[in-house]
Image (cartoon, rainbow, N blue to C red):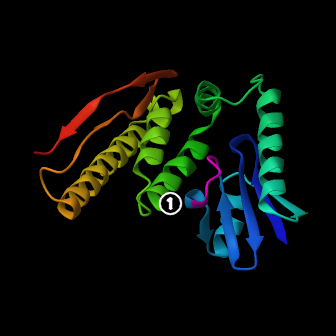
């Protein structure tokens, strides 16, 4: 049995009590993105980060994720966003106050970076850096830039580990990470050829 104990509807995030403890569930809904959290973070999420307390039971993850998606869709429709797309997410982030943006920076720093989710962190950071509240705040802008540097260093380290494992001269590929800036979706090409 899964028990949803807190939800941030507009973000599609939920805190779930499982047999193995509390988990934070967020888009994209993938196993690698399901993180265990300590009990004390539940109170912080509700008191400080805008989560609403709930007590809803689900038989399985499929039901729970469908509920989170529906709640996010309803929240976005209330804001005038009929569907949830990358552009809609960027528009939603544009409307968030500095405190919620700070919580998203915290998420990148405490969840994505320590777990090596470089691309997810970079995508979220690019979107956050386009928010007017971040542009207007030198502190948030600097923090976002520093976190982006950590992403770049982490990605480079991951590539270097791969090269060291496989061996030089045996690897050639192209990375095409999406970059989100000013609500636009641009693709940057970075070619890495080892030989």
Quadrant of the image occupied by residue 36: bottom right
Instruction: Give how far across and how far down residue 50 sits, in percent.
Output: 71, 51
Q: Which residue is mark 1?
A: 111
Query: Which residue: 23% across, 34% down?
Result: 191
Residue 94 higher or lower than 156, as above or below: above
Quadrant of the image occupied by residue 83: top right
Quadrant position of the N terminus in the picture? bottom right
**Nearest to the observer: residue 103 or residue 58:** 58
In the image, the segment drawn in magenta is 27-31
Instruction: Give how far across and how far down residue 19 sits, in percent.
Output: 75, 79
Residue 52 showing in the rendered view: no
Query: Which residue: 79% across, 55% down?
Result: 62
Asked whether 171 falls inside the magenta stretch, the response is no
Residue 44 higher or lower than 94, as above or below: below
Residue 157 showing in the rendered view: yes
Quadrant of the image occupied by residue 80: top right
Query: Which residue: 60% across, 60% down?
Result: 31
Query: Which residue: 55% across, 42% down?
Result: 101
Instruction: Give how far across and how far down residue 176 sits, in percent.
Output: 36, 33
């Amino acid at each position: 049995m899964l028990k949803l104990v807190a939800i941030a509807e507009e973000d599609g995030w939920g805190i779930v009590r499982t047999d193995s403890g509390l988990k934070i569930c967020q888009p994209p809904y993938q196993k690698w993105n399901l993180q265990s959290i300590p009990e004390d973070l539940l109170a912080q999420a509700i008191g400080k980060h805008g989560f609403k307390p709930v007590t809803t039971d689900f038989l399985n993850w499929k039901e729970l994720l469908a509920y989170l998606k529906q709640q996010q869709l309803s929240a976005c429709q209330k804001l005038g966003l009929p569907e949830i797309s990358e552009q809609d997410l960027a528009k939603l982030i544009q409307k968030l106050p500095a405190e919620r943006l700070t919580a998203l920076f915290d998420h990148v720093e405490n969840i994505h970076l320590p777990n090596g989710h470089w691309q997810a962190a970079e995508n979220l950071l690019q979107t956050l850096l386009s928010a007017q509240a971040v542009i207007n705040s030198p502190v948030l802008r600097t923090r976002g830039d520093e976190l982006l540097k950590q992403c770049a260093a982490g990605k480079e380290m991951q590539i270097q580990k791969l090269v060291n494992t496989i061996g030089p001269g045996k690897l050639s590929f192209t990375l095409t990470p999406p970059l989100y800036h000013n609500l636009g979706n641009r693709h940057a090409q970075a070619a890495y050829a080892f030989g």
